[in-house]
Image: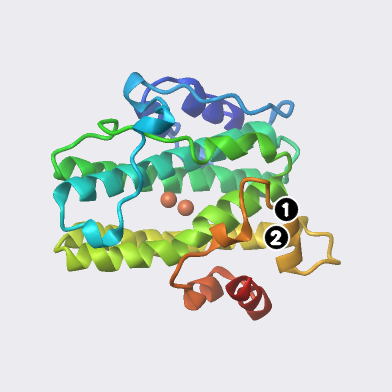
Amino acid sequence: MELQQLAKTILYTPTLEARFFLPEGGLTSLTDHDPGKPQPWIEPLRPENLQIAPKKKRKSLPHPSSLHDPAMRVRCLHTFANHEMMALELMAWALLAYPDAPPAFRRGMAWLIQEEQRHLALYIERIEDNNACFGDLPVNDHFWRIAPLLDTPLKWVCALNLTFEQANLDHAPVFARYFRKAGDEKSAALMDQIVEDEIKHVGFGVRWLRHFSNGVLSDFETFTQNLNDYMGIERAKGDEFNVEARRLAGFDDDFIQALKTA
Ligand SMILES: [Fe+2]
Ligand SMILES: [Fe+2]
């Protein structure tokens, strides 16, 4: 199967199951002989219970200190599951949007899809352990909104890997701590796993930021110049700035210091 076909199956089959689609032979069986022409963002098709909810119906992410309340735990896990689903939808779309990107970038994108499929499955499992279903609560279009602005793979990397995923290096450990405090060790362990994986995903972003940069600007300047109007630089970090995870992801100290003080 072609990467293009993988992307279309994930995006335009209106079922949750389709988000988990991979060909039988796995990633190595995927080919990329015909990446096609660049395709604009078209909203993915989803089942009825995962349609984007009107703003007034949406629920905000609960403060981590409320995670002792089972309803808040579900709401939190549900929000994170939706983030994973939107991330993998934007990854699938990247395969349609950037046919001319280097083959290694496109292969990496398929790997990221598989990673986020695993995360989505793990969150859904935790939601179901808490006697709820993914789709029970209204979902937002947080990541979808920015897609039309990502007209280059570099902008995609800066938004997805280097903003949303980078911020998760700060947010996820905080949620791990609060889940643990609330006695939910399984969700805490999941958050630990997410941090470990996110370091690799952000690392993918760091490598491609350098690949796509013009070699004149610093990593940090390239990053800030390729953010979009929806995303200030503050979105790339949380309250508890995780220097160690950023080093492991491959950022240099100049970038880390610049973001920390920005
Ligand atoms: Fe993820
Ligand atoms: Fe990720």
**Residue 118 at x, y = what percent?**
36, 46
- Which element is circle 1 on? loop
**Quadrant (top left/top right/bottom left/bottom right) for the N terminus:** top right
Q: CA distance from mark 2 to mark 1?
A: 5 Å
Q: Position of residue 11 (x, y in %)?
A: 50, 27
At x 66% / y 74%, what residue is drawn?
A: 258
Residue 30 can be seen, yes or no: no
Say left or right for 60 vs 167: left
Question: Which image quadrant is residue 146 in?
Answer: top right
Q: Which of the pair 136/90 is nearer the observer?
A: 136
Q: Say if residue 98 shows up in the picture.
A: yes
Using the rendered view, name the quadrant where residue 83 is placed.
top left
Res 223 label = 2
- Position of residue 232 measured from the top left corner of the image (x, y, whole percent): 62, 55
According to the picture, the residue beneath numbered tag 1 turns out to be 226
Which label was assigned to residue 75? none
Which residue is at a point 74% across and 26% down the rendered structure image? 37
Q: Residues within 10 Å of mark 2 (few under 14, many from 20)?
A: many
Residue shown at 19% from the left, 68% from the top: 181
Quadrant of the rendered structure where residue 97 is?
A: top right
Mark 1 burial class by Cα count in 10 Å: few <14, some 14-19, many 20+: some
Instruction: Classify residue 29 as left or right of residue 70.
Output: right
Residue type indicated by callout 1: Asn
- Label count reads 2
Q: Position of residue 160 (x, y in %)?
A: 57, 50
Residue sitting nearer the eye, 251 or 240: 240
Residue kind at label 2, given as amino acid type? Phe
Which image quadrant: the C terminus?
Answer: bottom right
| Residue reaching furthest to the front | 56
The one nearer the camera, 244 or 116, is: 244
Cβ atoms under marks 2 and 1 closer than 8 Å = yes
